[in-house]
Image: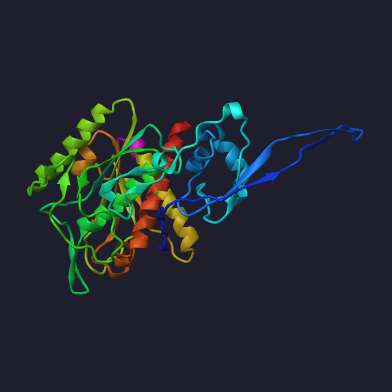
Amino acid sequence: MPNFPWKSNTVFLSIHRIPYLFVLFCLCCTFLGTAQDSIVQVTAQTGDGIYSLLRRHGVDPTKYYKDFLNLNKENLKSDHQLYAGNVYRIPFVANDDRIAPDSEEIEKMQYPIFGDAYATVEPLSNRLENTVYYLISGHGGPDPGAIENYAGKLISEDEYAYDVTLRLARELLSHGAEVHIIVRDENDGIRDNRILDLDTDEVVYPNKPIPLNQKQRLKQRVDVVNRLYLQNRGKYQRLIVTHVDGRASGTNIDVFFYHHHKSKNGKRLAESIHETFNRKYKKFQPNRQYTGTFKDRSNLYLVKNTLPAIAYIEIGNIRSKKDQRRILDPDNRQALAKWISEGVLLDFETSSNQ
């Protein structure tokens, strides 16, 4: 899996105004007039997003997002993200249609659960506006999940699943989603280490101790998610569960997905994320076939008993040396979160167009 760093830093913009003439000729080539407008060009810095960029300059992103894409379509990444250092054109807006420019303090939100280095989340778009996502990382508290010895230290499933979940939550928030992190560790944050220290202080939202008994532990999570789901009735809601597998040490696996066989929405969510991973592997690892699958696992307790449509994800085998490259490298954990989020966007925008 390729490195895919995605970090948000303080934003600064240099602005240049470049006048232009729009000349209209009639059939006999008679000059008719010249527009007096101007195009604003700005240089994108690390962490810039289209929505925050437009709002900063008094342009309503809900009205002019597509205009921005048309002006800059050859200068954008495939997922409509900006290239830091590139110059972008801002659509012309008449004075009576401008909005009050946002300050950086208003644009950016603070989420201490992500840790000091990642607490600030800058809006990149509102593509997931009015959606609600519940994120559960596997195990936690008294149950670390699968454990393996690596470089003389113990590494555990729950710590790596939690780190990917936090990174995914941050991605979804940046696109306007409402996100509920169900299994929580208030002092871990997103960590850029290969070896994540094992601890047992995780709780379940809002601050409930995690039972040792497996069935009680799973029921606790189901109850929390279902209660929140009923509170948000009528909204677009989805559940994503992240696990790290712990099968035999010689078995390496690609990322794979489960859903409930009776859930059309859950199947589409799992399929959309799977499709995204398949596409990314073809792009970044063209010489290696992606073997991850999505299929029904309705017998799993969380899949069977939770109300929102669910995608249950296994991101690799912690006991496999090959999979450890994907799980332990922080850039690869970020890539996992980014690719899952792209699959989520695909799922939502596909369902919205039906």
Q: Residue at x 17, y 61 (%)?
A: 198
Q: Is residue 321 above or below residue 63?
A: below
Judged from this view, the residue extending furthest toward the bottom is: 152
Q: Is residue 144 above or below residue 105?
A: below
Q: Position of residue 54 (x, y in %)?
A: 53, 40
Q: Nearer the viewer, residue 116 or 76?
A: 116
208 vs 79, left or right, is left
Task: Look at the image and say whether residue 190 sits in the magenta stretch.
Answer: no
Q: Which residues are magenta?
A: 261-266
Q: Position of residue 117 (x, y in %)?
A: 32, 55
Q: Nearer the viewer, residue 193 or 134?
A: 193
* Residue 58 visible in the current orientation: yes
Q: Position of residue 124 (x, y in %)?
A: 45, 44
Q: Nearer the viewer, residue 2 or 75?
A: 75
182 vs 74, left or right, is left
Q: Residue at x 52, y 33 (%)?
A: 60
227 vs 130, left or right, is left
